[in-house]
Structure formats: structure tokens, C-alpha cells
Image (tube, rainbow, N blue to C red):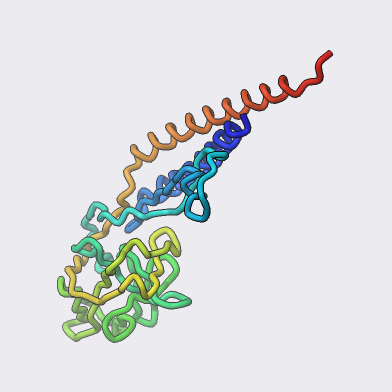
């Protein structure tokens, strides 16, 4: 019966965390460059077995990690000069974060008064081969070619080089669309295809997320009912005999 308590309680905890992640995905289903998140779960005895021989005394589910679905999102043409999209999957823009480089598929940039191209949220400068991409003040026509070369009124203004990784699974979320990467992830600057005037959307499917939220809510209710039934049974079995 105690084993049943562990199983039901772990079900409640898992359902709560899955619901939180699903709600996050749904909230960012219209955020450019957002990548769907998911949770990895295993049984208690499997987790314990990594450190010691499984005893079989505990049952239930343990959440062991978060993963990101890096499949590309849909492309939408905006014709905005500072909307950029990456034409190749598995590549990222590199921006200068407060504690080092950050990586993103969100190519919605804006121009600062100093002429730097920065992320629309956070204001992190877009990095090219030789540092931040800087547009000379007063420039009228800014063109980003498909090979990443940037010109302002016909004059060179930088060169965007996407970053790819040998092991994209090692990226860690630093925001809704930003990621950090350890050296072991193997970041490498590479040639890519830049699309100016295009915006890549989130790869979260709102309908699928809504269905998952309903399924998880039912799973939570079932675990809650099981926990209540077990608790009532324990009370009956421990009640003093008269």
C-alpha cells in the first residue's frame, strides 16, 4: 500500500511539471524561433539502479531531464530589413550575451541608435565574423545577402556566419529562444543561407499542446483519486478496533 502512495504521489508531481512545460510551449507558440520543450521520465527503480541495486520497494515515475525539439519552424515573409531567418536546420545566430555568447534561431533584430543590430528582446548584439554587426549612421539601404554578407548603401558592414554544433543536445535554455553551449557541444562557425525579410516561427503546434494539457490534467486527476483512495484505506486499516 505504501508503494501505491509513492506511485500516486510521483504521478501528481510528474503531471504538474509536464503541465508547466506544456503551458510554457503554448505561451510561446507565436514567439519567433521558439523551440518546443519536453520532459524525460523514468521509473524510480531504474533511476535508483544507477547508484545501487534496485530493491523493488519504490515504484512510480521520476523526471530526469528536459529536452528541446530543434526541428525548424515555419517561415513567414515580412519584408522587414532586420528580420532574418536561417535557411538551414541545426544552425543558430550568435549574439553577445552578458556572460558570453548565446545562440538563437530568433532572427528578429532591431537597429540601435549606435548602428548595432541587436535582438528585439534583451538587446544582445548580433555577432559576425569580426564582432558585432554595425551599420553606419544614416545608411538607407541595408542588404543581407544569402551568404551572410551585410552591406549598407553598397559598402561592406560585416559578415554573418551561423553556428552549428557537433552535439546540439548539450545546449541549455537561457530564455524562451536563447541557448548557452559548453565547449563539449562543439560550436563551429559555418557557411549558411540567410533569408532577409523572413521570420522563422515557433515549432510548437498549439493544437497538440492543448490536447497534451487535457491529457495531463486527466492523468493528474487519476493520480489524485488513487492517492485519496489509498489514504482512506490506510485510515480504515489503522483505526482502533472497538
Q: Residue at x 33, y 73 (%)?
A: 94
Quarter of the image that includes the C terminus = top right
Most foreground residue, 227 or 145: 227
Residue 64 appears anywhere in the view = yes
Most foreground residue, 131 or 13: 13
In the picture, residue 240 is in which quadrant? top right
Vertical order, 89 against 240 (above or below): below
Residue 40 locus on image (x, y percent):
42, 48
Q: Residue at x 27, y 76 (%)?
A: 188
Quarter of the image that includes the N terminus = top right
Residue 176 locus on image (x, y percent):
42, 58
Q: Residue at x 72, y 24 (%)?
A: 235
Residue 143 appears anywhere in the view = no
Most foreground residue, 230 or 2: 2
Residue 73 locus on image (x, y percent):
26, 53
Going by the image, does 23 lie left or right of 153? Answer: right
Going by the image, does 19 lie left or right of 227? Answer: left
Vertical order, 149 against 198 (above or below): below
Q: Residue at x 44, y 46 (%)?
A: 41
Outermost residue toward the right in this view:
242
Vertical order, 148 against 195 (above or below): below
Outermost residue toward the top in this view:
242
Amino acid at each position: 500500500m505504501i508503494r501505491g502512495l509513492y506511485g500516486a504521489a510521483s504521478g501528481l508531481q510528474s503531471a504538474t511539471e509536464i503541465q508547466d512545460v506544456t503551458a510554457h510551449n503554448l505561451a510561446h507558440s507565436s514567439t519567433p524561433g521558439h523551440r518546443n520543450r519536453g520532459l524525460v521520465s523514468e521509473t524510480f527503480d531504474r533511476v535508483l539502479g544507477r547508484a545501487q541495486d534496485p530493491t523493488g520497494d519504490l515504484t512510480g515515475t521520476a523526471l530526469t531531464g528536459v529536452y528541446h525539439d530543434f526541428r525548424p519552424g515555419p517561415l513567414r515573409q515580412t519584408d522587414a530589413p532586420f528580420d532574418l531567418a536561417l535557411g538551414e536546420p541545426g544552425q543558430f545566430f550568435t549574439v553577445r550575451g552578458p556572460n558570453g555568447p548565446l545562440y538563437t534561431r530568433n532572427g528578429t533584430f532591431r537597429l540601435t541608435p549606435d548602428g548595432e543590430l541587436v535582438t528585439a528582446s534583451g538587446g544582445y548584439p548580433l555577432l559576425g565574423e569580426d564582432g558585432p554587426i554595425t551599420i553606419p549612421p544614416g545608411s538607407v539601404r541595408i542588404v543581407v545577402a544569402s551568404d551572410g554578407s551585410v552591406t549598407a548603401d553598397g559598402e561592406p558592414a560585416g559578415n554573418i556566419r551561423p553556428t552549428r554544433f557537433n552535439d546540439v543536445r548539450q545546449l541549455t535554455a537561457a530564455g524562451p529562444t536563447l541557448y548557452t553551449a559548453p565547449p563539449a557541444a562543439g560550436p563551429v562557425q559555418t557557411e549558411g543561407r540567410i533569408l532577409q525579410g523572413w521570420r522563422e516561427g515557433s515549432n510548437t503546434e498549439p493544437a497538440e499542446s492543448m490536447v497534451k494539457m487535457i491529457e495531463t490534467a486527466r492523468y493528474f486527476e487519476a493520480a489524485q483519486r488513487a492517492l485519496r483512495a489509498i489514504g482512506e484505506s490506510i485510515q480504515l486499516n489503522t483505526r482502533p478496533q472497538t
